[in-house]
Amino acid sequence: MYIKRFITILFTILLSISVNSQNVKEVSRYWTSFSQTVEVQTDSIKKFKVVAYAKTDTNDEKAWSGIWARVDNKPEQGRGFFDNMRDRPIKTNAWTEYTVEGTIDAAAEKIVFGGICMYNGKFFFDKMELYIEDDSGVYQPVDIKNASFENKVADRIIPDWSPGISSGEISLVREFTSSSSDDRVDGDYSILVEGKDISDDTGNPEALLPNIGIFITLLYLFLIVFSLMTYTSSTDENTWSRAGKMGFRFSFIYFLLIIFFQNNGAYPYFGYIAEKPVELMQNFATWFGKAVVGIPYDVNTGPNGSGDTTYDYLVVFIVFLTAVIGTLIWSLLDRKRTNYKKLYYWLTTGMRYYVGLMLIGYGLVKVIQLQFQPPSFYRLMETYGESSPMGLAWTFLGFSEGYNMFMGIAEVLAGLLLFRRTLTFGAVITLMTTMNVMAVNYFFDVPVKILSTHLVIMTVFLLSRDIKKVMQFLVTNKAVEKLTTIPRPPFKKWLRISLGVLKGLIVAYALGYGLYRAIESKEEYGLNEPNPPLYGIYEVTNYVVNGDTLVDYNSDVRWKELRFERAGRVQVHKMNKERVNFNIVIDSTGQQLIKFSPSDDAASSFDFKYTKTENTLDFQYIFKNDTISGKTRKLGEEDFLLINRGFHWISEYPYNR
């Protein structure tokens, strides 16, 4: 009864904070932006352009500004055009007209555009206009609000423009102020955005929270201690020790809340159940981070591929505090209780399925080499020094199909945790597997540290009931008693049958549907994805511009390589190491590339004519009044030692290069 009241009070607080949460966010970072959104709809490919005047007044070498535009496509339609002028930044202190040009097609839903400012300085913008082609190919102006910024800035917000990179997002950056300026091109005012006191550490969470590593380490040590305290509660005795009961109470609250709020898709369809509570937690964590912890930057709660965000750590901290407080209250109100056998059964069941199903999912995508894929052309051509630690780990792990299968099988064996009789055996295997995963995540800076650490600690908790016997078997010559099995509470026959059927469905779903989805994904974007036309790397052996052969090895014009790896795209590497991405449409029948256009400047498209043999590709095109031609040779697997070295039973000497 008391526990129900405590939970009711907790969720009442979460609901109150959710209702009263603010819409305006203030963040700390080295850049800022403002934007406006226009909805678009077309059945054909059309060009658009954003035209604006801008200038930059700064002494900061890193400072620059730009006009930017992004096309947001409809759901499940992939990414659209994006350009923020990073490769041609605005650094001049004179009013100049700039243009960003792109394309929209039937998949496009919105055009988002505006200005961006980086680091310290004064950044001016004026007369920002948007044009979209009509069916006749003529640019037509689009009516946008406050285009010349004649409505004066109030409270750092530009009227009719959103601070941030999308409509509805209000993110004010502490380091930047916005105001109206009479230094203008059109009308009475322009916009002045000024950045001050910005360094490389601005907005860096670890620079703002220098002791975060020590705090996280201590928190995990507490978790391990409480987990090991609980092992005495897992005996078949009816009277548990005080330490065992204390450890269990904490573990029960902490681990169930972690499983609930950090489920990561372990339980099938659990996301639908947890959607509203997770939303409440997101609002509460945002408030808690600023009001209680004092985090001086905006807390992003949305998924972005990282499992180690500030929000994720706040959830861990909030759950930890809740478990500590809950344990104290529970201990005071329920101190006469002698054991928690039924709750222990349900806690271990939740943990067994969480760890087991999580690792089955991860294991299946490794068995078919979907998570760690073979090195791409990009990886094969870059140096070790250019890769990130995580990129290096992905390349190492993805190189070997056999090693992927080995890792995957080890992780799938965590399915032994789903059965009480194989729990200890499964926990021993799972502990070794998860510790290896955790080590890779920590030592190669992979942002899944929170999840992998909790998988290890949960496995330790599950193993703790028999850990003495396991250690006795491994390091002594003493006889070992039989391993224990967690007793199941007495269920009525209908409930026992129902739970058995549910378990069968869950296991079948995890293995059957999980494998089906993994194989399907492998066909869509994995190893079995069809290669696009011209698939391969082409090394440019000759490059001629207007009749002159370019030989400068530091040239920002001469191409070095063309990499055709993804459908509809090609990446060109120049001699100066600059990379340019192009969107392409290939007419393989007519041997011509249509709409060979830079991803960040679609208006600069050109027809790229080519002639291809088995090992060569010769091309010619006209770009900005320059006639350009070139010859290439196709690089094969034999050109990469990493790929062609192969396996050798006999090696008379080490081949370590």
Image (cartoon, rainbow, N blue to C red):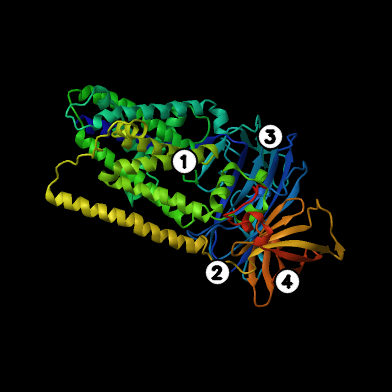
Q: Which mark is residue 189?
A: none
Q: Amino acid at mark 4?
A: Lys
Q: Amino acid at mark 3?
A: Asn
Quarter-of-image position of residue 510: bottom left
**Residue identifier under label 2:** 43
SS class of the residue under badge 4?
Answer: strand
Which quarter of the rendering shows the N terminus?
Answer: top left
**Residue identifier under label 4:** 609
Question: x, y (%) of residue 456?
Answer: 40, 37
Alpha-carbon span between mark 3 and mark 1: 44 Å
Question: x, y (%) of residue 211?
Answer: 52, 25
**Residue identifier under label 3:** 120
- Mark earlier in primary sequence (1, 4): 1
- Mark earlier in primary sequence (4, 2): 2
Q: Do residues under tags 2 and 1 come within 8 Å of each other at their CB atoms?
A: no
Q: Amino acid at mark 1?
A: Asn
